[in-house]
Image: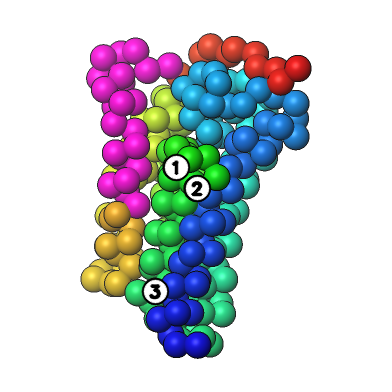
Amino acid sequence: MSNFLIALFAIVLAYLLGSVPFAVVCSRLFGLADPRSYGSKNPGATNVLRSGNKGAAAMTLLGDMAKGWLAVFLAQKYGTSYGLEQGAIGLVALAVFFGHLYPVFLKFKGGKGVATAAGVLLAIDPVLGLATLGTWLFIVFTLRYSSLAALVAAAAAPMFAFFLWGSDVMLPVVGIIAMALIGKHWANLQRLMAGTEPKIGGKKKAASGR
């Protein structure tokens, strides 16, 4: 099999892995309503948290992070043996991330990508991932706005990457992920500016699948 076909196969597998909707899967496991039916209608951990079930939200967060990390980790660890270069690994990283944003299993209407992006960045470079995650956590715990934390962390990630690597083939990958995250949070940014964006733990609406 040619290197091109191997790379294409890896990219498709990464996209399918990214498409696994852990918010929906975990909600069903915990007997909760579909996260697309309440709150922001976003199939992500923050919206699952609005159900009041912290366990389901935590499992969603870990699942979304893990799929991003796993796709890149496997491509880095085993890809070189099959002729995958850094550029192809970068495409794998983008594929798993955009799989979450536009999942084939949810008719291409997915989450906002924060947790999956964190997993991808941790796999690309643990220092980059931890710096970006630390930025997100700092904003979350000080200002209590998940969306603002995502926007600040997204803006910071390419700067962290540049300081760590300088000019590198992975730098545009981080930049694309950052721009996609900001785009996905554009409505949140407008609400933040208008003062209408809800804080974490502000309002909780119970959601039951029964």
Residue at screen point 49% across, 24% down: 41
Where does residue 94 sit, x and y in percent of width and height?
Answer: 40, 59
Quadrant in which residue 210 is drawn: top right
**Are dots 2 and 1 in contact, CB under 8 Å?**
yes
**Are dots 1 and 3 in contact, CB under 8 Å?**
no
Residue at screen point 62% across, 45% down: 62
Spatial CA span between label 3 and label 2:
21 Å
Spatial CA span between label 2 and label 1:
5 Å
Span highlighted in magenta in the image: 177-198
Question: Which amino acid, mark 2?
Answer: Val
Q: Is residue 50 left or right of residue 139?
A: right
Residue at screen point 51% across, 13% down: 202
If you read the primary sequence from the N terminus, does the residue marked by circle 3 or circle 2 appear first?
A: 3
Q: Which residue is mark 1?
A: 108
Where does residue 12 sit, x and y in percent of width and height?
Answer: 48, 64
For the stretch drawn in magenta, the main secondary structure is helix
If you read the primary sequence from the N terminus, does the residue marked by circle 1 or circle 3 appear first?
A: 3
Quadrant in which residue 158 is drawn: bottom left
Residue 36 in the image: above or below residue 124: above
Res. 202 in view: yes
Question: Which amino acid, mark 3?
Answer: Ala
